[in-house]
Amino acid sequence: MVEDGKNKDRASKPGDNIKEMIPIAANPDVSDLIARRLKKYYDEVAEQPVPDRFLDLLSKLEAANDPKKSD
Amino acid sequence: MEISTEFRAQIIAAIPGLRAFGLSLTSRSDKADDLVQETLMKAWKHHESFQQGTNMKAWLYTILRNEFYSQLRKRKREVEDADGVFSSKVAVHAEQHGHLDMADLRIALAKLPEDQREAIILVGASGFSYEEAADICSVAVGTIKSRVNRARARLAVLLHLEDDDIPMVDSHRRAHLTG
């Protein structure tokens, strides 16, 4: 019960740590710039086609998993 | 139990994002792809624990994240020993990358604590809501919000994006913001 309470306590005070960071985090220009750069960084990889390595792996897993195929 | 073609299709659709998330966590594309491989194998093995109709993408990101931290724990000593080497490797990668902005961002991300890095990537780049990110990281929503804000604040400093450096900030607004 005590441990449960601890978790709930943490969940119930979401604002505590946010307030101290508001000066920079709330600046919409800085936030926008960071958001755009993060998205660009992420999308450089996320927009690449799926490497064959993973498609091959899935095919192998599928073959191993499906006994009907070997019938 | 048979694995549906839909399950397979959903996994494939999630791979690009998983690779990007892995790279954000590790800063190394080879390590990132190893993480993705482990994730796919685990997802396949435990496909029965996935409930159709729930968020497959979040499920896969959770597996990748758990795998990352379990490897990190296993190699804790190795990671600590290599700490100095780590930043120089990041720098080399960044140069190969070519884009100066992206290089700066990659280095800055590597300097964030892991909990802040994953929070801002999940929310700011992977397209998850605060609630979904909180589920993936097994923490309260408020904790995720706090980590995202800390990460933003830290990135702003590391990337030298303090108010004065922002060309787009008009002077009225800046005066208002800085009081």
Image (spheres, coloured by chain):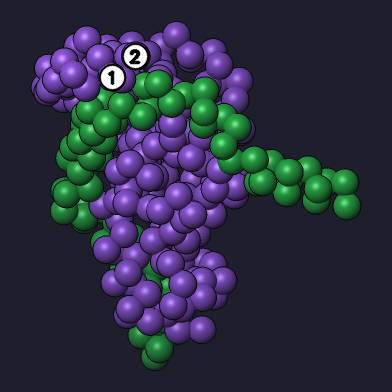
Q: Which residue is mark 1?
A: B176
* Depicted A53 relative to depicted B51: above or below: above
Q: Position of residue B91 (x, y in %)?
A: 27, 14
Please give left or right for residue B94 compared with residue B1 in the image.
left
Q: Position of residue B37 (x, y in %)?
A: 39, 51
- The answer to whether residue A58 is seen in the rendering is no
**Residue A59 versus residue A9: which sits nearer the camera?**
A9
On residue A51, the disc is: none
**Residue B147 versus residue A29: which sits nearer the camera?**
A29
Q: Which residue is mark 2?
A: B179
Q: Chain of mark 2?
A: B
Identify the secondary structure beneath mark 2.
loop
Q: Position of residue B30 (x, y in %)?
A: 32, 35
Q: Chain of mark 1?
A: B
Q: Residue at x 80, y 51 (%)?
A: A4
What is the drawing colour of chain B? purple
* Contact? badges 1 and 2 (CB < 8 Å): yes
- The answer to whether residue B131 is seen in the rendering is yes
Q: Residue at x 49, y 45 (%)?
A: B65
Please give left or right for residue B129 compared with residue B99 in the image.
right
**Position of the C terminus of chain A by quadrant:** bottom left
Chain letter corresponding to the colour green: A
Q: Position of residue B130 (x, y in %)?
A: 45, 50
Sort mark 2 into few (<14), some (14-19) or many (20+) by Cα contacts within 10 Å: few
